[in-house]
Image (cartoon, rainbow, N blue to C red):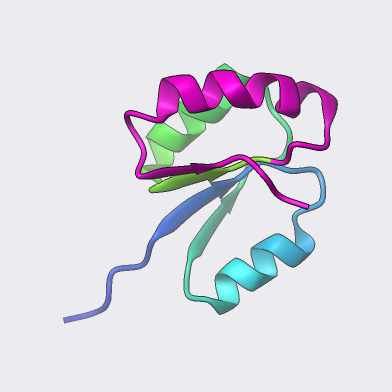
Amino acid sequence: MAPVTTRVLVATARPYDVTLALCEAGYEVIYVGEQPAQALLAAAEQEDVAAILLPTDTGELADSGFRIIEVAGSTYADVVAQLP
C-alpha cells in the first residue's frame, strides 16, 4: 500500500524555500500565491488540504490570517500562520 501524502496549501508571495522544504519532507504542496481569505478557503476545500500555510509579514494576508484561522481552524487539521 502506497504511503498517504499530506497535502498543504501555501499562500505566500515568496514560496521557494518553503515549498522546496515541504516537498523534500514528503508533503504535496499546492501553491496559490497571495489571495483574499475567502479565495484561500475555497482553494483549500477544493484541493482537500490538511493545512493552510500563511505568511504574517505581508499586509493583506497578515490581516486576513486571523479570519482564516478562525473559520478554518475547526475544519483543517492545522493552520500555520507564520512563514518567513
Determine the image quadrant of residue 39: top right
- Image side of residue 27 versus residue 76, left or right: right
Q: Is residue 33 above or below residue 71?
A: below
- Residue at image position (48%, 67%) is 27
Q: Is residue 66 above or below residue 76?
A: above
Along the line of sight, the residue nearer the viewer: 21 or 46: 21
The range drawn in magenta is 55-84
The spot of residue 69 in percent (x, y) is 50, 28
Residue 65 colored magenta? yes
The spot of residue 18 in percent (x, y) is 70, 61
The spot of residue 76 in percent (x, y) is 36, 38
- Residue at image position (36%, 43%) is 48
- Residue at image position (42%, 42%) is 47
Quarter of the image with the N terminus in it: bottom left
The mark tally for this picture is 0
- Image side of residue 9 versus residue 74, left or right: right
The spot of residue 11 in percent (x, y) is 66, 41
Residue 40 colored magenta? no
- Residue at image position (53%, 24%) is 68
Along the line of sight, the residue nearer the viewer: 63 or 10: 63
